[in-house]
Amino acid sequence: MAKIKVTQVKSVIDRSERQKRTMVALGLKKINATVEVEATPQILGMVTKVNHLVKVEEVK
């Protein structure tokens, strides 16, 4: 399965509790934090919900 690199680029302050929990579930707690995760449908759905807060790159 492909991997993606997800980097938090905006703060979760003044965001809904659901978006905050999604960011924590992705493993992102601070701005500029980066995680590499498998590109499963579940993860891609989570990234879609917070796409305005993160930057996504494909890992080769």
Image (spheres, rainbow, N blue to C red):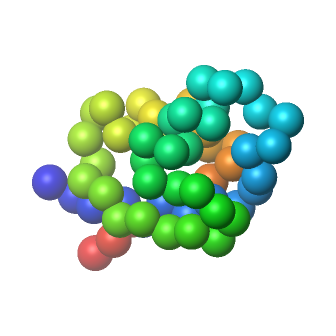
In the image, 55 versus 35, the foreground residue is 35
In the image, 10 versus 30, the foreground residue is 30
Q: Is residue 38 left or right of residue 17?
A: left
Residue at image location 62% in from the left, 43% down from the top: 51
Q: Tell me residue 31's x, y (percent).
A: 69, 65
- Which corner quadrant holds the C terminus? bottom left
Residue at image location 60% in from the left, 24% down from the top: 18
Q: Tell me residue 37's x, y (percent).
A: 31, 57
Q: Tell me residue 8's x, y (percent).
A: 62, 59
In the image, 60 versus 54, the foreground residue is 54
Confirm whether residue 48 shows in the render.
Answer: no
- Which corner quadrant holds the N terminus? bottom left
Residue at image location 57% in from the left, 68% down from the top: 33
In the image, 54 versus 21, the foreground residue is 21
Residue at image location 63% in from the left, 36% down from the top: 20
Q: Is residue 12 left or right of residue 24?
A: right
Q: Quadrant of residue 2?
A: bottom left
**Residue 57 sits above or below residue 20 on the image:** below
Confirm whether residue 16 shows in the render.
Answer: yes
Q: Tell me residue 50's x, y (percent).
A: 61, 38
Q: Residue furthest right?
A: 14
Q: Residue furthest left?
A: 1
Q: What count of labels does the image hold?
A: 0
**Residue 48 sits above or below residue 23 on the image:** above
Q: Residue furthest bottom?
A: 60
